Amino acid sequence: MKTRLLLLFYFFLSSSALLLAQQSEQADTNVTDKVLLQEFKLNGNKSTFLIKGTSSLHDWEMISKSFNGFFIVENAESANPTLKDIQVTLGVTTLESDNRVMNKKTYDALKNDEHPKIYYKLKQVKSIKAVGNDTYKAILNGTLTIAGKSKVVDIAATLVLNSTKVSIHGEKALKMSDFDVEPPTALLGTLKTGNDITIEFNLNYL
């Protein structure tokens, strides 16, 4: 009888120790998961979004330094980080050139009254390759929305990322007509912008 009681007591202690170990391991895993998945906020004060184009008189550009967004990455410190999400929101009227008339014409062409924001959202990472210390070359596939029309585009970008900050820079050639935007004109039609534009971006996240 005493032997049976000792065996039952030993079994109880073993089961309790195993349960505590499993709970501790699960808790450690949950903490690890929280550390691995990180979200960074876009620093609009240290980022730029530039649209460049041509016209019948001269080349032109409009720049914005005021926008917001976020970047979510898993395993930022590893050799194979996983980009989970990238989103950018830009107000049309934050884009400015040195020509007020052209600014107004551009806002009208971009249908600012009905669609005051330009959006970008990551769909998938087509490729990513380490090219240096914390530096990667990537092809980002995402949805770009301009003047209320969305288009899926591939963008080649260079990323620098670690556990404390992220930066992305690159450029993408587009056509205004891809987004049903009519190239603006000014000076009674003597200044006509071309259909081709290039978007250049330098985004910094903290």
Image (spheres, rainbow, N blue to C red):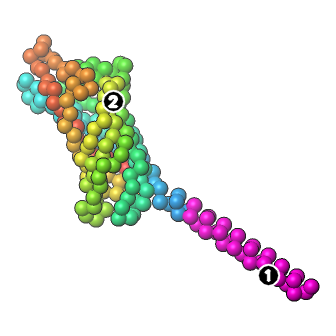
Give the mark nearer the N terminus: 1 vs 2: 1
Question: Does the stretch in magenta take in 182?
Answer: no
Q: Residue visible at 35% across and 54% down? A: 166
Q: Position of residue 130 (x, y in %)?
A: 28, 61
Q: Residue furthest left?
A: 57
Label at residue 10: 1
Q: Residue furthest bottom?
A: 3
**43 and 201: which one is in front?**
201
Instruction: Please count the marks in the image.
Output: 2
Q: Residue visible at 39% across and 63% down? A: 77
Q: Residue visible at 12% across and 14% down? A: 189
Prevailing secondary structure of the magenta residues: helix
Reading the image, the residue beneath label 2 is 150
Q: Residue visible at 38% across and 59% down? A: 81
Q: Which residues are magenta?
A: 1-30
Q: In the displayed structure, would residue 92 be above or below residue 75?
A: above
- Hey, what amino acid is under mark 2? Ser
**Label 2 crowding class (10 Å Cα cut-off): few <14, some 14-19, many 20+?**
some
Q: Position of residue 196 (x, y in %)?
A: 16, 30
